[in-house]
Amino acid sequence: MNSREYFESIKHYSTLEEGSEVADLLTIRATAFIQQLAVLFQQKTRIEDDVKRYLSAPWDDIVIQYIKCIIAMHNRKFAEAFEEHHSMVQIFQRAFSQQFGRWSLPILYTINYDLRLLAIKSDLIFMMAEKPPKNLEIAARAINKSFSLCITDRAVLNVSRKWGTYYFAGLLFKTYFKLKQQNLCKNVIKSIRASTDLPPFGQFPRAHQVTFLYYQGLLAFLEAEYTQAEEKFVTAFRMCPKSSQKNKELILRYLIPVWLTRGILPSPELLSRYPKIESLYKPFIDAIRDGNVKKFDDTLVKFELKLVAQNTFLTVELAREIAMRVLFKKVYLINIRESKVPLSKFQQALKYVGRDVEMAEVMWYMASMIQKGLIRGYLSYSKEFLVLSEKNAFPVFDAPALT
């Protein structure tokens, strides 16, 4: 493709309002394409004149900034490329707010996504040079501007830019998490809740819905609101296409620890479909199933660094109580389901699996499980007995079906 063909393609598809086609001509991710363009335009001395000969405002300025960006990328000047691309985004945002409609959303998606990629790349180079990173925060502000332009649009629904709201909400979540500024996600959620004229959530593209649900679940997970987290994760998982293996694994990374804290063990069939998830969580599940508290503790030590890195350590640690519950249930069954079981027998069982604890600690474990509904019964502190319900003393919790 020569320069004239490129300019005419931009003009042709923008005139027809073919947003996806224009977006493909303005992305930085088509490696071979941008290298060809960069080499082509780097040889020219008067790029602005060439562009303005074929394109009128605002496309002339947008394309000029894009060309400057890809030339800088070709020369591996990523900080400069980010600045040029950021200017392009700002020019497009002005045009988007004044004259472009819903058709141009794919372009806005692409240039904001690419801006984030350039920010991460250039910030990495800053850090390698022992300079403070700054570009991802700048990109976050630009993405937030695009979010605002979409959610505040007042055009009629069929041409409304509101249809971009959840895409940019998801991109903001992803960016804020990268910046470790998760608290800012709440502002996005508040804005969406305050917007009473958004189309129904179920009418937005499924990919946008899944991303939004995933991050809602993740925010609830990090605040230990596990019931809400489970609801969001299960819904997101069910909505994911079967081909989205990586996304499903990402959801299971957090959903399975939530299940384990409730005594829900995922099926071997589910685990077998996601080898990375199976290799991480199956040892914990086996320890819980066996009621082997020591094995659970040893596995926690083995995978501590990985669990800490993905923010699941504390939640998985809570599932230790479930392994203990299984052990206590075995004591109950050995005692022929007697409703009154001496606490000393539970103490002996813990000692058998390598955990020698005082009676006060055994009582604390029991009281905690009773309070959470994991065991049905009550403690007789004076006589050191556990008095169990005659019906369903150890409730069974089933996992929701996942496909």
Image (cartoon, rainbow, N blue to C red):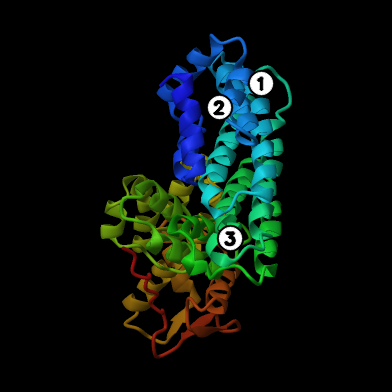
Which residue is at 59% across, 23% downward?
A: 53
- Between tags 1 and 2, which lies in front? 2
Q: Identify the amino acid type marked 2.
A: Tyr
- Between tags 3 and 1, which lies in front? 3
Q: Is residue 212 visible?
A: yes
Q: Nearer the viewer, residue 369 or 136?
A: 136
Residue beneath disc 1 = 80
Badge 2: residue crowd in 10 Å (few <14, some 14–19, many ≥20):
some
Residue beneath disc 3 = 160
Q: State how far apart marks 2 and 3 are (Cα).
A: 29 Å
Q: Give x and y (percent) for residue 313.
A: 54, 50
Q: Give x and y (percent) for residue 132.
A: 73, 26
Which residue is at 48% across, 20% downward?
A: 3
Q: Identify the amino acid type marked 3.
A: Ser
Residue at the far front in the pictured view = 53
Q: State how far apart marks 3 and 1 are (Cα).
A: 34 Å
The image quadrant that residue 65 belongs to is: top right
Residue beneath disc 2 = 54
